[in-house]
Every structure is written in C-alpha cells, then in structure tokens.
Image (cartoon, rainbow, N blue to C red):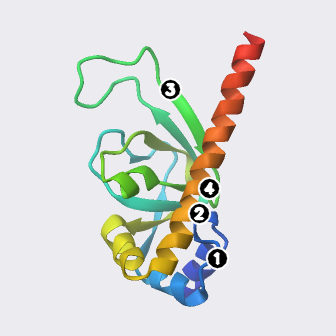
Amino acid sequence: MLEERIVNILAGVAVFQGLTRDDLKSLANKSRKLTFQERDILIQEGKEESALYILIKGKLKVFLPQEMKGKKEQRVTEVSLNFLKEGDCFGEYSLIDHKPVSASVIAAESGELIQIQGTDFHEIVDKDDRIARIVYENILRILVKRLRKKDQELDLMLVIG
C-alpha cells in the first residue's frame, strides 16, 4: 500500500519527528510521490510556489542562478548554497512566508521526492496546534542547523583567506 510506505518514509524525516502515526497518515493522504531525472529543475528562484518537498532518493543542489528572474542585473556567477540528501526537505521558506521561491533546486542525480502542497500543509497544521508546534519547531531546528553550518563555512573561508 502506497500510503503506508509514505507514512514510513515520513516517520524517518526530521521535519516530522514527534508526530504520531495518525498525524503522518493525514500528511501522507495529502502528499504526492514524484520522480525526477538528473538536471531537472525542481523549483526555480522567483517563482510563486508553495509546497514542502522531502527528498527520498537522489541528490539535489540548491543554488542561486546567475540570471536573476525578473531583474536586469545578473550575479557574477551561479552561487551554490547547499546539497540535499535523502531525508532533507526544501521549499519551507515559501511555505512559511508566502513569498516567491528564494533559490533554485536542480537534480544532481535522478531520484524521488514527496510533495505536500502548501494549501494541504496549512490545512493540516491550521486545524491542529500540536502538529503545528511540532512541525514548525522541527523546521526551525533544520534552518538553524543549516545557518550554523554556513557560519562555520564562512568562518573557515576567513581564516584560510
């Protein structure tokens, strides 16, 4: 059964740690499993999109493209921000602040992901404060972890340079 497989996948993902099986079933019922090929662009900087994505197979690159959507100026070069591995999530910025996507994500290799549309995600968290608290705390922890990692990388660049 596909729903049970998705529940088991979601149970192992950091953003959903602490949720009950019933909570995960609600999320699984609102999710879609998608496949992608190497070099597919999964989300694009500047686009109006609201969804949470969970990578379940493959590797993704998060980057700022050289050409900035809707602007005359360009970046000097593409800016690589992060690589995502199985279990990582993305799309959380737009999901939370309802603004255009802040970075692009491209497949470094083919794989699979789970997508939960923003309207479905908000429907679930808006009707249950406990689920909302758990998920938003988990997202906050993930974002802080990413920021700390970037701080360390920048610090190393300054020490080496």
Q: Of the numbered discs in the image, which one, if any, rests on residue 18?
A: 1
Query: Camera-side residue: 88 or 140?
Result: 140
Q: Which of marks 2 and 3 is in front?
A: 2
| Badge 1 amino acid | Gly
**Closer to the N terminus: mark 2 or mark 3?**
3
Q: Mark 4 points at which residue?
A: 141
> Percent from the top left, x then y, of residue 87?
63, 61
Residues at discs 1 and 2 in contact (Cβ within 8 Å)? yes
For badge 4, the amino acid type reads Arg
Q: Mark 2 points at which residue?
A: 138
C-alpha span from label 4 to label 2: 5 Å
Identify the element where label 1 is drawn.
loop
- Residue 75 x, y percent position in the rendering: 40, 18
Q: Residue at x 33, y 58 (%)?
A: 50
Residue that carries the numbered disc 3 in the rendered image: 79
Q: Are marks 3 and 4 in contact (CB under 8 Å)?
A: no
The residue that appears at 70% across and 15% down in the rendered structure is: 158
The residue carrying pointer 3 sits among few (fewer than 14), some (14 to 19) or many (20 or more) residues within 10 Å by Cα, namely few
Q: Is residue 38 above or below residue 65?
A: below
Q: Which of marks 1 and 2 is nearer the N terminus?
A: 1
